[in-house]
Image (spheres, rainbow, N blue to C red):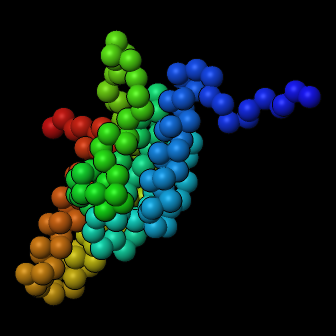
């Protein structure tokens, strides 16, 4: 009697890379909190590298199997990965030496960037309302406002938005 074909057998290098990256992205996502799919191959989650109240981490799986990770609050990728016990090499599938990859023009979808900065916009709005009401900003308020502006600028850069002016 012939046995059924092995369903888990991976035939080609491309299939192996696809399997490995899906496995890696699944491992990464399983170690994050409040993961939400935001599109095809994109997710948002709480950043494990800082005390994140809302999802400020964007994860994107590219067609070639690479995984991009960006914290809109400013955590570096090494800190994010260390917090979930992964290495930077885990984000890249094995490939031949001759394989070259073009950099992503806009690595994160605009919708993910907007979701990540929504809270920071509220911080800016709250500061504006206080100032309009004649209330002075405390040192802590000013520092938080500067941080919010910095995070918004970081999000624009991550989205590939440039301004001329």
Q: Quadrant of residue 99?
A: top left
Q: Which residue sits at x=28%, y=57%?
A: 82
Residue 141 rendering spot, x and y as whole percentages: 15, 79
Q: Nearer the viewer, residue 133 or 126?
A: 126
Q: Which residue sits at x=27%, y=61%?
A: 73
Q: Is residue 45 above or below residue 11?
A: below
Q: In the displayed orientation, state which residue is furthest to the front.
A: 1
Q: In the displayed orientation, state which residue is furthest to the right.
A: 1
Residue 69 rendering spot, x and y as whole percentages: 35, 48
Q: Is residue 152 above or below residue 46?
A: above
Q: Quadrant of residue 139?
A: bottom left
Left or right of 118 on screen, residue 1: right
Q: Which residue sits at x=55%, y=54%?
A: 37
Q: Dividing the image into 4 quarters, which one contains the C terminus?
A: top left
Residue 60 rendering spot, x and y as whole percentages: 44, 43
Q: Is residue 154 above or below residue 10?
A: below
Left or right of 101 on screen, residue 137: left
Residue 17 rendering spot, x and y as whole percentages: 50, 30
Can residue 42 be seen in this snapshot?
no
Q: Nearer the viewer, residue 7 or 159?
A: 7
Count of numbered tags:
0
Left or right of 64 on screen, residue 3: right
Left or right of 102 on screen, residue 23: right
């Amino acid at each position: 009697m012939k046995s059924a074909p092995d369903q888990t057998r991976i035939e080609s290098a491309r299939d192996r890379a696809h399997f490995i990256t899906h496995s890696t992205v699944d491992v990464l996502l399983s170690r994050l909190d409040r993961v939400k799919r935001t599109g095809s191959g994109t997710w948002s989650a709480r950043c494990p590298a800082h005390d994140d109240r809302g999802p400020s981490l964007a994860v994107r799986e590219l067609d070639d199997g690479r995984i991009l990770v960006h914290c809109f609050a400013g955590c570096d990728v090494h800190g994010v990965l260390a917090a979930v016990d992964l290495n930077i090499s885990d984000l890249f599938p094995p490939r031949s030496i001759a394989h070259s990859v073009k950099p992503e023009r806009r690595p994160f979808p605009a919708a993910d960037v907007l979701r990540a900065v929504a809270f920071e916009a509220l911080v800016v709005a709250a500061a504006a309302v206080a100032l309009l009401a004649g209330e002075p900003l405390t040192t802590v308020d000013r520092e938080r406002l500067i941080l919010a502006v910095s995070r918004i600028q970081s999000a624009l850069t991550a989205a590939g938005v440039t301004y001329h002016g």
